[in-house]
Image (cartoon, grey):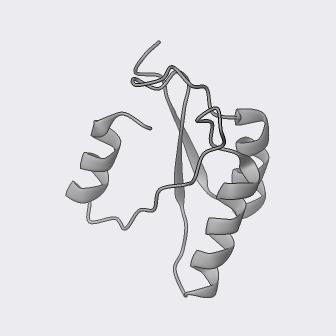
């Protein structure tokens, strides 16, 4: 549920990206991100960038930065926090 500019930037930069499943309240969770990072590494990819959102434009959901941040730190993945709604 990130702003549409996030997907556009990935396409323009030639970066492969994946959507992370959200919970029942439309929040990205750390465990879901960690699983995709694990899968990517197993497939020979190098995850380097994650986007979380504070206030999505369609549901005003706030991703769980308290979970996502530690995953990104552990996996050496840069975390961008989008606040288009804020």
Q: Nearer the viewer, residue 83 or 18?
A: 18
Of the 4 image quadrants, the one containing the N terminus is: top left
User: Seen in the image, is 22 located left or right of residue 30?
Assistant: left
For the point 68% across and 57% down, the residue is: 32
Q: Residue furthest top?
A: 86
> Splitting the image into 4 quarters, where does residue 40 fall?
bottom right
**What percent of the width, then of the height, locates residue 69?**
72, 42
For the point 64% across and 32% down, the residue is: 25
Q: Residue furthest front?
A: 24
* Numbered marks: total: 0
User: Seen in the image, is 23 located left or right of residue 40?
Assistant: right
**What percent of the width, then of the height, locates residue 61?**
57, 25
For the point 63% across and 68% down, the residue is: 37
- Residue 51 lies, with reference to residue 84, above or below; the image says below
> Splitting the image into 4 quarters, where does residue 34 fall?
bottom right
**What percent of the width, then of the height, locates residue 19?**
47, 56
- Residue 64 lies, with reference to residue 37, above or below; the image says above
User: Seen in the image, is 16 located left or right of residue 59?
Assistant: left
**What percent of the width, then of the height, locates residue 45?**
51, 80
- Residue 46 lies, with reference to residue 57, above or below; the image says below
Q: Nearer the viewer, residue 45 or 24?
A: 24
């Amino acid at each position: 549920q990130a702003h549409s500019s996030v997907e556009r930037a990935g396409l323009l930069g030639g970066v492969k990206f994946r959507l992370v499943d959200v919970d029942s309240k439309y929040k990205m969770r750390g465990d879901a991100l960690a699983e995709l990072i694990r899968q990517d590494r197993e497939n020979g990819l190098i995850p380097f960038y994650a986007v979380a959102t504070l206030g999505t434009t369609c549901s005003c959901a706030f991703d769980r930065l308290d979970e996502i941040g530690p995953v990104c730190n552990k996996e050496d993945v840069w975390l961008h926090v989008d606040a288009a709604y804020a």
